[in-house]
Image (tube, rainbow, N blue to C red):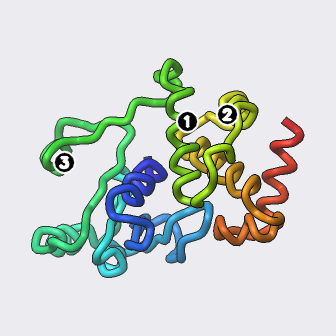
Amino acid sequence: MVPIAEALHRCTLGPDKPFILCDPRRLTSTATVRSPASRTSGVAAFEAAIGGSLCMRMRRFPDDFQALVARLRSADDVLCVLCTGQLADAYRRFILPAPLAVPPLAERSADLDRIIAEYAADAIAELAAPAASFTADDHAWVRDHAAGSLAEIETATLRVVATHTSRNLSHAAARLGMAPVSLSRWLGRRQGA
């Protein structure tokens, strides 16, 4: 659910606004290609998320949750996103104006080609690439090898477009904000699939 929340954040608030995960089981960290920035403390996450989004898993609230709730009640510059697999009735009061339900990708097989096409269009727009940067063969590969989740589809389409439209692997990796060796390994797995 966190990758979906982060994708919605980028689409609604933009990639330049902070997206902070509050997770008491993770160390305080900065954002990477693989994961968002995180804080163990709710209040620290709130401070880091000012002007953006604070995301929490409902099964894993921080120790200072009550202090965080007090800060959130008086804030209008932090969007709080609560992620849960199943929403129990007891928690419905937290969700205003209404919960956003995202059905599992496995239940949306009829939508898969459209979802891949939309993520490819987003990748083309984000990288200011020509429409031909994502081919029918690329689409088929994503469907067959990288469609386990929305986040996986998003990652695959973005990386495919970047590699097709960059002068070399290092340039593509730089455009994606990742290490060239990581992109090289991902490409190696793609070619082996």
Badge 2 vs badge 1, beta-carbon distance below 8 Å: yes
Label 3, secondary structure: give it: loop
Q: Residue at x 31, y 81 (%)?
A: 47
The label shown at residue 117 is: 1
| Label 1 Cα crowd, 10 Å radius (few <14 / some 14-19 / many 20+) | some
Question: Percent from the top left, x then y, of residue 124?
Answer: 58, 51
Label 2, secondary structure: give it: helix
The quarter of the picture where residue 15 lies is bottom left
Q: Amino acid at mark 2?
A: His
Q: Residue at x 61, y 34 (%)?
A: 148
Question: Percent from the top left, x then y, of residue 117?
Answer: 55, 35
Measure the C-alpha gap from mark 2 to mark 3.
36 Å
The quarter of the picture where residue 48 lies is bottom left
In the figure, 151 relative to 175: above or below?
Answer: above
The first of marks 2 and 3 along the sequence is: 3
The first of marks 2 and 1 along the sequence is: 1
Q: Amino acid at mark 3?
A: Ile
Badge 3 vs badge 1, beta-carbon distance below 8 Å: no
| Label 3 Cα crowd, 10 Å radius (few <14 / some 14-19 / many 20+) | few
Q: Which residue is mark 2?
A: 139
The first of marks 3 and 1 along the sequence is: 3
Q: Which residue is mark 3?
A: 95
Label 1, secondary structure: give it: helix
The label shown at residue 24 is: none
The quarter of the picture where residue 131 lies is top right
